[in-house]
């Protein structure tokens, strides 16, 4: 157990940050999964309505990733890698839809 007031405070702060980080990471994973499902549906149907759903999902995921990077939850390269993975999934799905 901690021996000083500052160490006790650090424990409280670390726990608060851990919970915040956990919620952001969970939200990012959920949005990415939702996006990949939307891309899968788009690749099978290929209609413009589904493309709009994909674009909305991508926008939501990008936004959450950018906010997580801004708050220091993800390193900027990690955020960039996740966004590139999303873009690549859509790029690879488009030729099948045509």
Image (cartoon, grey):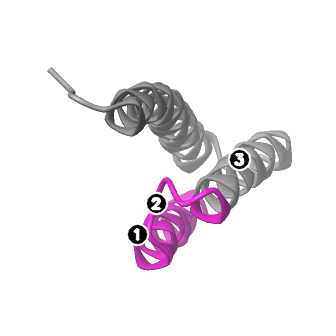
Q: Find residue 7 and report its horizontal and vertical position in percent.
A: 32, 36
Q: Earlier in the sequence, mark 3 or mark 2?
A: 3
Rendered residue at 48%/36% (across/down):
17
Residues tagged 2 and 1 counted as in contact (Cβ below 8 A) = yes
Which one is nearer the viewer's eye here, 52 or 32? Answer: 32
Up-down relation of residue 58 to residue 29 (above or below): below
- Between marks 3 and 2 in the image, the one whose residue lies nearer the viewer: 2
Per the image, label 1 sits on a secondary structure element best described as helix
Up-down relation of residue 18 to residue 61 (above or below): above
- Between marks 2 and 1 in the image, the one whose residue lies nearer the viewer: 2
Q: Which residues are magenta?
A: 69-98
Q: Which residue is mark 3?
A: 54
Q: Earlier in the sequence, mark 1 or mark 3?
A: 3
Per the image, label 3 sits on a secondary structure element best described as helix
Which one is nearer the viewer's eye here, 9 or 40? Answer: 9
Quote the CA–CA distance across marks 3 and 2: 24 Å
Q: Is residue 82 magenta?
A: yes
Q: Which residue is mark 2?
A: 74
């Amino acid at each position: 157990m901690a021996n000083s007031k500052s160490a006790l405070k650090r424990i409280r702060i670390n726990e608060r940050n851990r919970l915040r980080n956990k919620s952001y990471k969970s939200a990012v994973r959920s949005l990415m999964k939702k996006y990949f499902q939307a891309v899968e549906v788009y690749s099978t149907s290929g209609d413009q309505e589904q493309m709009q759903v994909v674009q909305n999902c991508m926008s939501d995921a990008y936004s959450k990733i950018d906010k997580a990077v801004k708050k220091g939850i993800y390193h900027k390269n990690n955020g960039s890698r996740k966004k590139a993975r999303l873009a690549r999934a859509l790029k690879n799905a488009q030729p099948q839809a045509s």
